[in-house]
Image (spheres, rainbow, N blue to C red):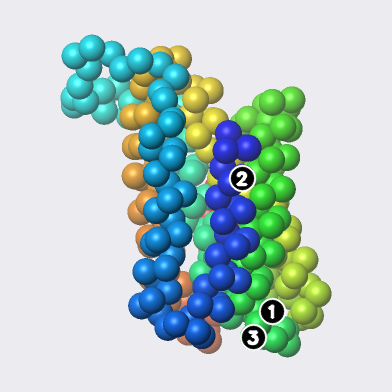
Amino acid sequence: MGVVVAGSSVGGICWPFMLERLFGQIGFAQTVRAAGFICLPLLIPPCLLVKPRLPPRKGADVSFRIFKETFTDRTYVILTAAMFFVFWGMFIPFYYLPSYGLAPGVSLAMANNLLAILNAGSFIGRLVSGLTADMFGRFDITFVCALCAAIVLMCLHAIQTAAGIIIFSILYGFFSGGLISLQTACVAQITPDMHMIGVKIGLMMAVCSFGVSSTYPFLDILSTPFLRRLDVVGPGTGMLL
């Protein structure tokens, strides 16, 4: 899984550089169209070539019973709740890192490149977390990644130099990449029937999507001067949960 999801980090490295140049040359609308035409030939081959490892069960359907059995699994429910809080806090730097980068004196061009640096760290983190998870356990490495990512996130306001924000981007990308890499592996570990893996991963992602989508409104509320410091402390504490 680490190798597979590391591919998206490679895209995360390339897209910021590409989009920054295209926005200035052809405008927003044409850039979006160009991005679509770039993605199209890259996504067609997997749709045609990827095959399921297990054949689908004949007559299988998604019924209320399946959802009930899934959400009565205590281990799965705890994991889903934990990942909800992790995702709730994890994507703050992905939204605001360029803006935070301008405060320590980073140039505008370099601030836009911080996301590429973060994704470079994430690429390494996704590979390393997958390797170490096989040796020390998936849940153990997930816990370490969540703890370290939360600590690094809560240090964001203490950074006062350009070198510091770059180091932050690398470290946070590394640990958050491990979380992205291991979430589905943790679900697979607690799923005895592999025919249920798609349902369990889909339900967990659906629950986590509410955490991701609520992050931005939450940060908007905390943008007042009185609550400014809580914009990373609050979600960072959520990741520690």
Picture residue at 65% right of the left edge, 43% below the top: 126
Q: Residues within 10 Å of mark 1 (few under 14, many from 20)?
A: some
Question: Depth check: 163 or 117 in front?
Answer: 117
Residue corresponding to mark 2 = 6
Question: Any mark on residue 108, and which?
Answer: 3
State left or right for residue 61 relative to residue 33.
Answer: left
- Counting from the top left corner in percent of width and height, residue 24 is at 51, 85
Distance between the alpha carbons at the discs numbered 3 and 1: 5 Å
Q: Could one spot residue 72 in this view of the protein?
A: no
The amino acid type, in three-letter code, at marker 2 is Ala
Q: Residue at x 19, y 14 (%)?
A: 59
Whether residue 209 is visible to the viewer of this picture, yes or no, is: yes
Name the residue beneath numbered marker 1. 110
Image x and y of residue 134, in percent: 69, 26
Cβ atoms under marks 2 and 3 closer than 8 Å:
no
Circle 2: element type: helix
